[in-house]
Amino acid sequence: MECKQEQNLKDCPCTWSDCPRKGLCCDCIKYHWGRGELPACLFSKEAEKTYDRSIENFIREQNSHK
Ligand code: SF4
């Protein structure tokens, strides 16, 4: 299977433009999960901009929508 980086880049909502993992979803999730974090695409536009990718921030955001 070929890498879908180019296709993934079209959908990637991450605003951290210098990241070398952009569009490489496998590396992206491995990197963030290893730090107790989640990738940008799981956050809302507003939360993504804070660059707080912590699981706590994800849960906080989910609970704020209830
Ligand atoms: S979510 Fe993190 S690893 Fe993924 S593209 Fe953005 S800054 Fe890079």
Image (cartoon, rainbow, N blue to C red):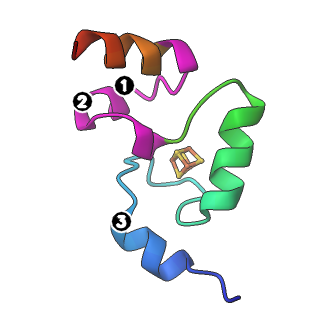
- Is the residue at mark 2 in contact range of ligand 1, meaning its CB lies under 8 Å from it? no
* Dot 1 alpha-carbon crowd within 10 angstroms: few under 14, some 14 to 19, many 20 or more: few
- Is the Cβ of the residue at disc 3 closer than 8 Å to that at disc 2? no
Q: Is residue 54 found left or right of 45 in the rendered image? A: right
Which residue position holds label 3? 11
Locate the N terminus and report the quarter of the image it occupies: bottom right
Under mark 3, the amino acid is: Asp
- Is the Cβ of the residue at disc 2 closer than 8 Å to that at disc 1? yes
**Label 1's element?**
loop
Q: Is residue 59 found left or right of 29 in the rendered image? A: left
How many angstroms separate mark 3 from mark 2 (CA)?
17 Å
* Between 3 and 17, the one nearer to me in the picture: 3
Instruction: Give the image location of residue 21, x and y in percent.
Output: 62, 58
Under mark 1, the amino acid is: Thr
Where residue 57 sits, quadrant-wise, is top left
Q: Identify which residue is drawn at 43% across, 70% down.
A: 9
Where 18 falls versus 1 (above or below)?
Answer: above
Check if residue 18 falls in the magenta segment.
no
Which residue position holds label 1? 50
Instruction: Give the image location of residue 65, x and y in percent.
Output: 22, 17
Mark 3 or mark 2: which comes first in sequence?
A: 3
How many angstroms separate mark 3 from mark 1 (CA)?
19 Å
Q: Identify which residue is drawn at 35% across, 72% down.
A: 10
Instruction: Give the image location of residue 36, x and y in percent.
Output: 69, 24
Instruction: Give the image location of residue 42, x and y in percent.
Output: 42, 39
Under mark 2, the amino acid is: Glu
Kindly give the residue lying farthest to the bottom in the view shown. Answer: 2
Mark 3 or mark 1: which comes first in sequence?
A: 3
Where 41 falls versus 4 (above or below)?
Answer: above
- Label disc, if present, on residue 46 of the rendered structure: 2
